[in-house]
Amino acid sequence: MMKTARRALVIVLAVILALALCAVALTACGNESEVNPGGGGTIGGDTNKPVIDEGDICNGIEILTMPAKLEYKTGEKFTPIGLTFNATYENGYVEEDLTAGDLDGWTPRDAFTTWGEVEVTLIFEGYEEVITVDVEPKTLEDMYIKTEPSVLTYSVGSKIDFGGMDVIAKYAEDEEEVNETNYTVTDAKGKQYVSGETILDTPGTIELTVTITAGDIKMTDTFTIEVINGFSVQVEDTVKDGQTPTDKSYTVLSGGNVNSNLPCTGSEGNTAMYLGDIYSGDYMEFHIYSATEVKGAQLVLVAASTLINNDGQKMDDMVLSDIFDMSVGGKPYEYDGDVILPGNPFPEAGSNANKWAMWENVTLGTVDLNAGYTVVRLTCTETPQDSNGDYRAGNFDRLDIVFPEVIENPCTGIEITTNPKTAYTEGETFDPTGIVFTATYEDKSTAAGLTHEDITWSPTRPLTTEDTYVTITHKGFEKQIPVTVSERKLSAVEIVSEPNRNVFAKGEKIDLTGLTVKATYEGGYFENITDYTVTDADSKVYVSGETAFTAAGELTLTVTAESGGVKKTDTFTINVFDGITVQAEANGEHGETDSYTVLEPVSDGIKIKTNESHSEGNACVENVKVGDKLTFNVYADVAGDYELVVTTCSTLRKSNPSGTLKVNFGEVFKVTVGGEQLTLTDVVIPEKDLPSGGSIWFNWQEISLGTVTLEEGYNAIVFECIAQQKDPADGSMRAPNFDAIDLLYNAEA
């Protein structure tokens, strides 16, 4: 439906326009009307023009101007700003020159997660118009698993759960790392695992690979889960409505609270529930049902420490064997030593983990299960106190019952008759498909012609050059197969992004932050790498944050990477400056980043003297009088501390031999840097003899005014004459002359 306010306004304007047209027509025709052969009004006052009424339906959009932004990166949201369009209604009315603000909405509203041509639906008055935008993937530079899932151990038949996992990605377009949720998880055979959906039906250790894909770039990291041969009893699986089951495990709870909404899933049911707030006298009673007798079943309690340590920003360890007495079948159970529930550091802000559900697997001991029910009771006898003064006994998710591994007629030997592939390039995974072997068993029997379907192997991850063998397992027997893993052969190295800084001062240490290097290998595989060296033309190695620049000038640095016996390079250029020099006479035109001076004479004071070969720039500033100012507007590429050196000369003359007399600089000049006045109490232009053929007015000396701090960009250094001194030769009042200033970067300040 249309927005009522706009519709009302359109109706009013239409009526006013119609009345005005009728008035004009009557006046022009002398109030003589002629029937309009088209019907519906009179000539000169067309009453057949469609108007908009409440309930009229928009049935078309004509886009006049597309939105200004039609190209996006993943992670950005669509914006319709710049859109203009006309809307047509079923009665023929056309509403013109509408803008993005008139839309009722659009989809998708969330950030783009896929790339390519993506459809965006514009919604106006119930009508939908589809446009297409281009979405490019962000440039993936790095990724890693910062926090593994809260649950890493499952019983057979459980659904996998990634709750609590933090996968961190660094993109070139983002200043900070992001907690990425758009990833896939697969095993060594390429099977995809979906949180809350994939059922774990095979016991054993499984290495899972987390992959982030951004365009052609893929990066991975791994974590490992354990699937146990057994089953679990959830703490929340209590008796319902007094209906005690006869062939199913359940719990009986005395005290405590069953809570939810924490990432504590990962076993049968995947219910986000747990037991907490247990105090002395409360108990958890697990009624474990087994269809047959089981000798030596292991009891593993999945729990989380709640013993807060605010100073350490962590949960402290809890000694469960001191907190809970355990009984099996009504008889006390003696723990085999202390049973420790480890505490963990608090998760960082923004993490998917929760400090109350940092689950750990704690082995309580082994028991023999009856055919039918075996009752295990944990009774709280002591509640320790945390740093807040609260008494806590832990949070509890479930009890895992792990069957002992029993292999009937285990394998005692393997003879390989046909080897699988044993030569690999790093990044490939072990391929067992070619293996054929004969196995010998405990009862002396043999089986020939066995294949890869009869074994498991490790590692299942992509192989590295450090892998020298793969271990295969058949019915409890392990055998190592030697493998050779060669480096990928490098085909190109490319600097994707240069360092954030490309200007440094002599003495400063290089900073390579922001440098991104991509390596491409034979076969087309490529990745961003950090295993490279940076050198100059003299083969000097530059290490970020360590290597200092010893010479000024333009410096070309070479990035070198090596793999598979092949070296490849790329280069980038930086500039190293030897401080900043500003001539006193540099008061003319200048560029946007050039230093310059401003002279502010009083009366007939300060001025520039040119064509003087004794001056560095063939000119200098002289005739300085009280009140005169000389401002050096210094442009610094790099903020930091600099030593301020002034090239100046005394104009007080001495004789026998000829030369200049000492001047206390701070008595003659007030110097400010960025508005802050320098202390010049001990700064002196020393007495100096005049060289043969020299001029008394250009008897230059370099004096240091100490260390000053410059900001990046322009900095005002002002010399203001506050006094003159009497020249003993003729009694005239004089102040020193200026040639230049130098600012020497102090990298260690």
Image (tube, rainbow, N blue to C red):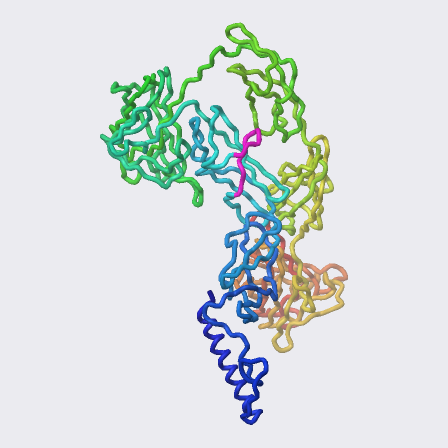
Identify the residue at horizontal 52%, vertical 51% (top origin): 111
Question: For this rendering, which residue is in front, 202 or 130?
Answer: 130
Q: Is residue 499 above or below residue 524?
A: below
Residue 21 quadrant? bottom right
- Residue 127 drawn at (x, y percent): 52, 61
Q: Is residue 312 visible?
A: no
Identify the residue at horizontal 32%, vertical 31% (top origin): 235
Residue 337 quadrant? top left
- Residue 542 drawn at (x, y percent): 65, 41
Query: Residue lying furthest left in this view?
Result: 281
Q: Is residue 634 visible?
A: yes
Q: Is residue 393 left or right of residue 593?
A: left
Q: Which residues are magenta?
A: 182-192
- Residue 5 drawn at (x, y percent): 44, 71
Residue 693 quadrant? bottom right
Residue 630 within the segment the image draws in magenta: no
Dominant secondary structure, magenta: loop
Identify the residue at horizontal 59%, vertical 41% (top origin): 213
Q: Is residue 592 left or right of residue 10?
A: right
Question: For this rendering, which residue is in front, 573 or 122?
Answer: 122
Residue 191 within the segment the image draws in magenta: yes
Question: For this rendering, which residue is in front, 264 or 203?
Answer: 203
Identify the residue at horizontal 29%, vertical 27% (top origin): 245
- Residue 648 drawn at (x, y percent): 65, 62
Q: Is residue 332 left or right of residue 646?
A: left
Count every numbered label the image shows and give the total. Answer: 0
